[in-house]
Image (tube, grey):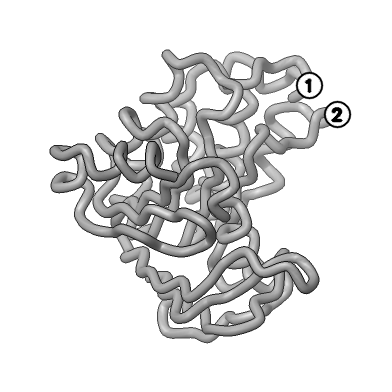
Amino acid sequence: MLEVKNLEAGYGKVPILRDINLIAPAGEVTLVLGPNGAGKSTLLRTLAGFNKPTVGTVMANGRNITGLAPEKMVANGLRLILDGHRVFPRLTVRENIRLGTRGDAAETEKHLKEIYEVFPILHEKLDHRASSLSGGQQQMLALAQAFVARPEILLVDEPSLGIAEMLIPTILDFLRRWTRLGTAVLLVEQRIDIALRYADSVYVLRGGEIILNGPAAELADGDAIERLYMDG
């Protein structure tokens, strides 16, 4: 479980996030929504150790990880998938995936089989350079690389960015299935209509503050989120 209490952070002396309190339970998709400039990406980067919080605490499964460097966050079971399909373009698909592997060979092969069942195109292009993949395929590859590392907490920043709409449900369904392993998934996404179908709970950010949160099923039935976007 990821638990954030009274978090404040920004860039230099410029505050972005104020009094952030949220919980991303194990085995659930926790969705973070908000208009552009709300602080969503800053939140994920702060939780992953790229920005230092000025106030507050970040707990991962009961461990205080506040302010740790990114590599220490990874060692504590937390992993961030950045927007923009960040992979190693000169390496092959196979090499990119292998960079994330952990555990014994049998366990790794099991994980790889799961990936190829969901994303068969990656299996077809194992020996192709990542730079030759489409944007959607690179997003699949970034997810695959994280999946074989088996993080306890996964932060995902706008996986739909720059990819074909037909691929978005496949990627979000993969994240949904991932939670069955007990992983806590904290997802930032702009596509409200699609993302709400895969989320358990929702937090809405505006102006660096959480202005609404609740079960995804309840918020999806009303127009509260849309009103908040229009009012912002």
- Who comes first in sequence, dot 2 or dot 1? 2
Where disc 2 sits, the SS reads loop
* Mark 2 and mark 1: Cα distance apart in space: 6 Å
Residue under numbered circle 1: 131
Residue 55 lies left or right of residue 20; in this view the side is right
Q: Quadrant of the N terminus?
A: bottom left
- Extreme residue toward the right, this view: 90
In the image, 124 versus 145, the foreground residue is: 145
List x then y, in percent, for residue 155. 52, 54
Residue under numbered circle 2: 90
Residue 222 lies left or right of residue 147; in this view the side is left
Q: Amino acid at mark 1?
A: Ser
The residue drawn where x is 80% and y is 29% is 89
- Whether residue 107 appears in this view of the structure is yes
The residue drawn where x is 30% and y is 55% is 28
- How many marks do you count on the picture? 2
Residue 43 lies left or right of residue 190; in this view the side is right
List x then y, in percent, for residue 19. 48, 76
In the image, 43 versus 117, the foreground residue is: 43
In the image, 101 versus 79, the foreground residue is: 79
- Extreme residue toward the front, this view: 231
The residue drawn where x is 64% and y is 76% is 53
Q: Which mark is residue 77?
A: none
